[in-house]
Image (tube, rainbow, N blue to C red):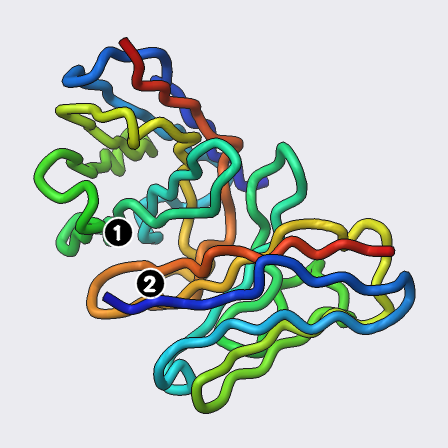
Amino acid sequence: EVQLVESGGGLVKPGGSLRLSCAASGFSFSSYSMNWVRQAPGKGLEWVSSISSSSSNIYYADSVKGRFTISRDNAKNSLYLQIYSLRAEDTAVYYCARDFMAGGYDYGAGYWGQGTLVTVSS
Amino acid sequence: SYELTQPLSVSVALGQTARISCGANNIGIKNVHWYQQRPGQAPVLVIYRDTNRPSGIPDRFSGSNSGNTASLTISRVQVGDDADYFCQVWDSGAGVFGGGTKLTVL
């Protein structure tokens, strides 16, 4: 069974930093591109970042470029999101999501974790 | 940047057919994916690449995509279909979500 478990969220002051983690199990982690998607309270989904299976291709939303860094450790079956210079508008549930197809491109996100809440407030 | 436009809400009577649109310039040339999100839960992929259903998704869910509009159709709507639905595409190295549509089953 595919499982994605996010951790690392919490209450952070504006300007602070945080590192989110996503522990993956139940599939060959190194074969899949991975994604971070966030959802502000009561709002819609916002794509944040994606990383290919070998980390050779990395993409960011304009809203987080320069402040967020996505990475992965295939040996540890883990995905990460390092967040710097946090702003109030970064407050959201952050979901880790696996691409639907291994080695594929643009098949959507087929599996999602339950998310971790990041709250930015003084 | 590429924008996807969805109606804020759609209402449908139990057992009838619901259609949710996702509009954008030339969306017909892109792969459109659809997600269902029930309150307090993570999103679930219900349609990928315009028309394809992942295993476990009922065949009541179908999709289409042409010109400037993609659509998600839910036939024989059930109470459990009451949820938010989001369309999504990949454009120029970035993921893009529609604003979401709240489907209300009457």
Q: Secondary structure at mark 2?
A: loop
Relative horizontal placement of residue A89, taking residue B10 as reference (left or right): left
As drawn, A104 above or below B24:
above
Q: Residue at x 58, y 78 (%)?
A: B51
Q: Mark 2 falls within which chain? A: A
Q: Separation of disc 2 and disc 1 at Cα?
A: 8 Å
Q: Residue at x 39, y 20 (%)?
A: A7
Residue type for callout 2 = Gly
As drawn, A86 above or below A104:
above
Looking at the picture, how far across and down is residue B12, in whole percent? 81, 64
Q: Secondary structure at mark 1?
A: loop
Q: Residue at x 29, y 69 (%)?
A: B2
Label 1 packing within 10 angstroms: few (<14), some (14-19), many (20+): many
Q: Residue at x 61, y 61 (%)?
A: B46
Disc marking residue A53: 1
Front-most of residues B19 and A113: B19
Front-most of residues A34 and B20: B20
Front-most of residues A107 and B73: B73
Looking at the picture, how far across and down is residue B37, in whole percent? 61, 47
Disc marking residue A103: 2
Q: Residue furthest right?
A: B15
Q: In which quarter of the view is residue B103 placed?
A: bottom right
Q: In which quarter of the view is residue A102 placed?
A: bottom left
> Does the residue at mark 2 contact the one at mark 1 (Cβ under 8 Å)?
yes
Picture quarter with the N terminus of chain B: bottom left
Picture quarter with the C terminus of chain B: bottom right
Looking at the picture, how far across and down is residue A29, in whole percent? 36, 43
Q: Residue furthest bottom?
A: B67
Relative horizontal placement of residue A113, taking residue A53 as reference (left or right): right
Looking at the picture, how far across and down is residue B18, in whole percent? 75, 70
